[in-house]
Amino acid sequence: MALSGLEIYKLLPKTNCKKCGSPTCLAFAMKLAMKKASLDDCPDVTEEAKKALDQASRPPIATIVIGAGDNRIEIGGETVLFRHEKTFYHQTAIAISVDDTLSVSEIDRRVKNIEEMSFERVGQHITIDMIALVNKTGSSEKFTAALERVLQNSTKAMVLVSDDVKVIEEALKKCAEEKPLIYAATGSNLKDMCRLSKDYKVPLAIKAKGPDELGKLSQEAASLGAEELVLDPLPETLNQALNDFTQIRRASLKKNYRPFGYPIVSFIKAEDEDKYGSVRDASVYITKYAGLIVLDSLDREVLLPIVTLRQNIYTDPQKPVTVEPKLYSFGAVDKNSPVMVTTNFSLTFYTVSPEIEASKLPAYLLVTDSEGMSVLTAWAAEKFTPEIIADTMKKLELENVVSHKKIIIPGYVSVLSGKLEDASGWNVMVGPKEASAIPKYLKEVWK
């Protein structure tokens, strides 16, 4: 929890030496509170004060990094309970499990399927984030052999799943530089797992039945020097998971309870063939408030609704998803092809473009920069005006692209037609209000 300027002042030397560049210690404290100065600027601050200020300035939920290089994944780091309060920063990571009971060919095939699993949604390319290697055999040799196959075929961030300290340590000898998450420390192996986390500099998951026991283990792990933690309260039911996850999130944010100041991990074990159960559980966990979920299923029917929900929740409401403002072409366009215009709000673009394609008529779509607003919203905010449209047409040299000098505007902003004709010198046609009417409009109205 952030300290006020007066609270910071109490921890400073109070000598008013001006070595920090501020006239008084109080003025320096105020700058620290506003994050306009660094504690390092004060040469006389004590180590005790540094430690106290460092603890107080820690975010309520730590950001934990799993993986290395381009495939590193960040979880946690959230500051609010609800997205509308500010925003959510790190979307729930999705891992797919790989068991060490599988044969070499089965491991290779499963990893290949994980690597190839992807989705395109509103212009975003979505893939699986991580692989969770599970030690079901209990054998260190088989686990290490499976790990080698995964490492040969994938560079994704990993979770190493085993309660056996020896199994985890042998695996870390081969992949510590990849910074996997080790899962998991329990009451019986906590000291050894914390040692591995410190020695190999990798994040550690701790698990215990319920928030109370988990909080005690988290405190003990911190006292043992484990700094990068992930929590699993091991809920037995979906209702319990919802309650436990919410309790942990609230305690960390509202009460600044440090033992809960870490992201949550949860394994989804839906019953065989229960696709709906997997989607249901994952949806609840993503919404409230898992930082990482591990799934067994590679079924697209399971993963698509999960990644869709995640994308919707973790899209910053203050920063709409946009497409690049430019001239898009559909089909074998030529100088006689129609030109339609819209805004760069991605949902609008991906609603309009399939309808243009469905018309089977080669056409252009001029996309203006509306700061990610839909047509009506942009028009009301004066971000989709005749002047902006005409300026975009001029910048893209539209007169050199087509010869007919006709442009089609959305039906909802037909009021723009007269001023746009004056601003551009083009003939403005009023298109349909709904995107679904575009194919019929282009076939029947466009001449």
Image (tube, helix red, strand yellow):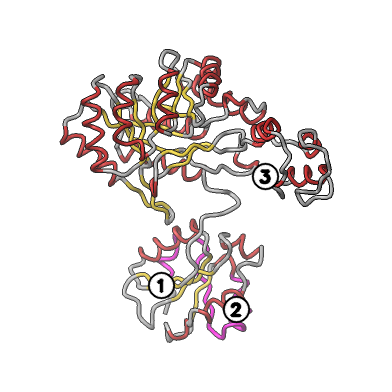
For mark 2, give the secondary structure.
Answer: helix
Question: Residue tagged by mark 3?
Answer: 40
Q: Earlier in the sequence, mark 1 or mark 2?
A: 2
Depth check, front residue: 248 or 313: 248
Whole-Å distance between the Cαs marked 2 and 3?
58 Å
Q: Earlier in the sequence, mark 1 or mark 3?
A: 3
Depth check, front residue: 159 or 326: 159
In-image side of 74 versus 304 (left or right):
right
Disc 2 marks which amino acid? Leu
Tell me what residue is drawn at x 36 percent, y 46 percent.
Answer: 127
Depth check, front residue: 345 or 247: 247
Can residue 281 be seen at all in this image of the molecule? Answer: no
Quadrant where the C terminus is found in the figure = bottom left
Q: Residues within 10 Å of mark 2 (few under 14, many from 20)?
A: many
Disc 1 marks which amino acid? Glu
For mark 1, give the secondary structure.
Answer: helix
Disc 3 marks which amino acid? Asp
Question: Residue tagged by mark 1?
Answer: 444
In-image side of 265 versus 78 (left or right):
left
Depth check, front residue: 66 or 378: 66
Q: Nearer the viewer, mark 2 or mark 3?
A: 3
Instruction: Using the image, tell me which numbered label, if any, was put on residue 420.
Output: 2
Residue 6 x %, y % = 81, 37
Q: Residues within 10 Å of mark 1 (few under 14, many from 20)?
A: few
Whole-Å distance between the Cαs marked 1 and 2?
23 Å
Quadrant where the N terminus is found in the figure = top right
Dot 1 and dot 3 residues touching (CB under 8 Å): no
Q: Residues within 10 Å of mark 3 (few under 14, many from 20)?
A: few
Q: What stretch of residues is rendered in magenta?
A: 414-443
Tell me what residue is drawn at x 55 percent, y 35 percent.
Answer: 62
